[in-house]
Amino acid sequence: MRGLVRWFEGHVLRVGLIGLIEAALAVLSFGAVLSAVFGGPAAKTAAVVVAVLGVLATFAALVANRRRGEADRLRDRRLTARYCDLVHHAIGAPLHYLSWDDVTVIDSRGDAVETIAVRARVEADQAHFFRFRIGPAWDQPERQRTRVVCRVRTLVGGAARGPRCDTTETWLADGRLEVIAHLASPVKVGDELRLVIDLEWPGMCAPLVREREPDDYFLRFARPADEARYVIVLPEGEDTYAEPIGFADGDRGYDLTVKPNDSGRVQVTLTAYDIPARHRFGVRLDLK
């Protein structure tokens, strides 16, 4: 008897309360099926009712368990983002951006594939994580946001892609995605941090492509940046008007071109130099 009690205790610890409920309901449902096959009319009716209730109860238990699990994951992501934010404000952003190369390719549905190559020098303290916020400049439906895929990798030897970093992702109230990439090894002061970010974003450019409305594409860095290049490749057969954002007339700190690339698709390229911290800059597009 003592051995049976110990086994039952270990089983509870392994499967939890939901697991026990599922097992009990499975036994009841099996008994109900036997009664429905071999019992009389009244027994068969009662057995069918028990079986249906058992299935519904199992489904309800699974849904409740999954909701609790999702709530726990959301809480953990919020706490991780909060404490990374506290560290960020306590020591300042320890990076100086050497280059930021952002290439966004848009298809005819307004979906976007974005690749960002980052080079930054660590200045204030060791870098244990890299945080960035990204998203469209409009209120995107949640059903599209749930399909966004973000991968962050270190660049080994400056060029070769390394393994994916562990990431913590949180959706902000303004519709942007905050991503914290946790580095496998801290980057020392004076060394370069090199990353590549791959994003698959359904519907990101829908206002521009589907609704034919002007749309803004802009960047902003927490610390100064030496150079940033923002490339937007339009869907095949499309052309656009383009206007720089964040630059005065006659400003020589940027270059903006709109011309076909090697594949014949129109490509908008904005290159900016010596960008101050928290300066909002980019380009406004309006398809012809």
Image: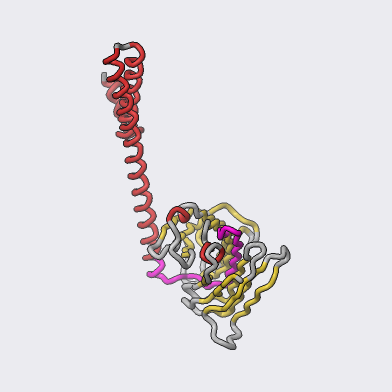
Residue at the image position 41 percent from the left and 58 percent from the top: 170
Q: Give 40 or 283, whichever is nearer the viewer.
A: 40
Q: Nearer the viewer, residue 30 or 196?
A: 30
Q: Is residue 69 left or right of residue 226?
A: left
Residue 111 at x, y = what percent?
56, 58
Q: Given the current orientation, which residue lies at the most extreme bottom position?
A: 250
- Relative height, residue 149 to residue 252 (above, below): above
- Which region is colored magenta? 87-112
Q: In the image, is residue 127 above or below residue 60?
A: below
Quarter holding the N terminus?
A: top left
Which corner quadrant of the image does residue 271 belong to? bottom right
Residue in view at x 39 percent, y 55 percent: 77
**Percent position of residue 32, x then y:** 32, 19
Q: Residue 101: within the magenta?
A: yes
Question: Is residue 152 in view?
Answer: no
Q: Residue furthest right?
A: 262
Q: Residue at x 72, y 63 (%)?
A: 263
- Counting labels gives 0
Residue 252 inside the magenta-drawn segment: no
Type of colouring:
secondary structure
Residue found 52% across the figure and 54% down from its top = 149
Tell me where residue 159 sits by quadrant.
Answer: bottom right
In this orientation, which residue lies closer to the viewer: 134 or 79?
134
Q: Quadrant of residue 99?
A: bottom right
Left or right: 280, with 46 as reference point: right
Residue 37 in sight: yes
Where 232 falls versus 22 (above or below)?
Answer: below
Query: Which corner quadrant holds the C terminus?
Result: bottom right
Residue 136 image position (x, y, % from top left): 49, 65
Q: In screen coordinates, is 235 left or right of 220?
A: right
**Residue 26 position within the rendered picture, expressed as x and y whole percent measured from the top left:** 35, 25
